Image (cartoon, rainbow, N blue to C red):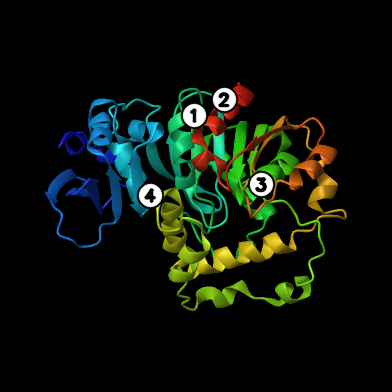
Amino acid sequence: MTLADRYDPSASDPPLQARVRLAAGDEEHDVVLDAAGARVVEANGARADAVLSGSAAAWRRAADGGGAFAALGRGGLRLRHNLHVAAGFLAATAARRDSGALCLRTVETAHGPIATAQAGTGPPLLALHGLGGTKASFLPTLALMSGGHRVIAADLPGFGDSVKPLRAPYDAAYFADAMTALLDALGIDRTHVAGNSMGGRIALEMALTERDRIDRVVLLSPAMAWLRPRRWAPVVRLLRPELSVLPMPVEGLVRRLVPGGDSGWSAAGVDEFLRSYSTPRGRVAFNAVLRNIYLDEPHGEAGLWSRLSAIQHESLFVWGLRDRLVPIAFMKHVERTLPAARHLELDCGHVPQVERPLETHDAMRAFLG
């Protein structure tokens, strides 16, 4: 197979050791990956680490037009299970193998190892995922923005394939410091930042606390401190995320609660959430962040809304008209607090870069210049 023959294990550091299933209609092949390369074997029905599926036409485009990564940017390929492995296969089979080619790199930082997916050359763009997500939620961004930017999609500490400390505070200030440490390790003095949901909250924190390191900021359905009274706050403050080390079977519940949780990008996102949440440290991190999001102070000296007007960076907010987690009603509060910020409304839910990739990235390119 063309893609397997083109496989370059150096595209992932450390190299992948996994089984990837490639499906075109009813036809399936497995590709076994290790440091020596890739070999095609018969699909034996066992669960593969990652599954890439698409029409025969999509696979022909992948083989002939620059690799599966390029095909992902154009649509037609679907990913499931371990998206770190799927992204590694995309990276390793791309025809482009120059300094801007997609690659997976685990970067040693002052906060521990941070897993990244990187692609492109030009002004840096740091991409930060939402709660329960991973760098894989920015695969469309890596595909569509790497023509003019060096895109760095990171797994935040506690998520994906990054370090998962048990006693980290897992609040916005902690994540902002960890991402600054990542910039230090990569030798990047200044960067644009794009953040989705929780990643948007971290992007705002970086703009407030690392002003000289941040250029322009893109907020994709950013998590904002609640303005309504939080009647459960006294109870939530008493909750101890450390107790989450105990097993908690949640797969069935999550797939029922997430719209489209058994198909498409939603199913892939649930796969990534479960991959972290199935580990004790991943559960601690998730529940600590969830607690901190609820307790995020809106007002007062440390309150987000009180501090927000101090942001002087050019900012683009992208809102989903059908977003149930961060309602578009927040937009009017941002308009009052940051009157110079730009806004884009899209007919989508909570993850614009995945649900409306063309409109989202067209707007990002125009904004970032």
Going by the numbered disc 1, the residue's amino acid type is: Met
Label 3 close to label 4 by CB (< 8 Å): no
Q: Which mark is residue 365?
A: 2
Instruction: List x then y, in percent, for residue 247.
Output: 46, 77
Q: Nearer the viewer, mark 4 or mark 2?
A: 2
Instruction: List x then y, in percent, for residue 203.
Output: 66, 43
Q: Does residue 23 lie above or below 103 as drawn?
A: below
From the image, which quarter does the N terminus lie in? top left
Q: How far apart are marks 4 and 2 (CA)?
A: 26 Å
Q: Distance between the residues labelled 3 and 4?
A: 24 Å
Q: Mark 3 points at which residue?
A: 222
Q: Which of marks 3 and 1 is nearer the N terminus?
A: 1
**Residue occupying the point 71% across, 63% down:** 294
Which residue of the protein is positioned furthest toward the top in this rendering?
A: 369
Q: Mark 4 points at which residue?
A: 84
Q: Does residue 279 lie above or below 210 as drawn?
A: below
Instruction: List x then y, in percent, for residue 360.
Output: 56, 33
Label 4 close to label 2 by CB (< 8 Å): no
Label 1 close to label 2 by CB (< 8 Å): yes
Q: Is residue 288 left or right of residue 7?
A: right
Q: Name the residue under label 1.
A: 145
Q: Nearer the viewer, residue 91 or 196?
A: 196
Going by the numbered disc 3, the residue's amino acid type is: Pro
Q: How far apart are marks 3 and 1 (CA)?
A: 20 Å
Q: Nearer the viewer, residue 303 or 261?
A: 261
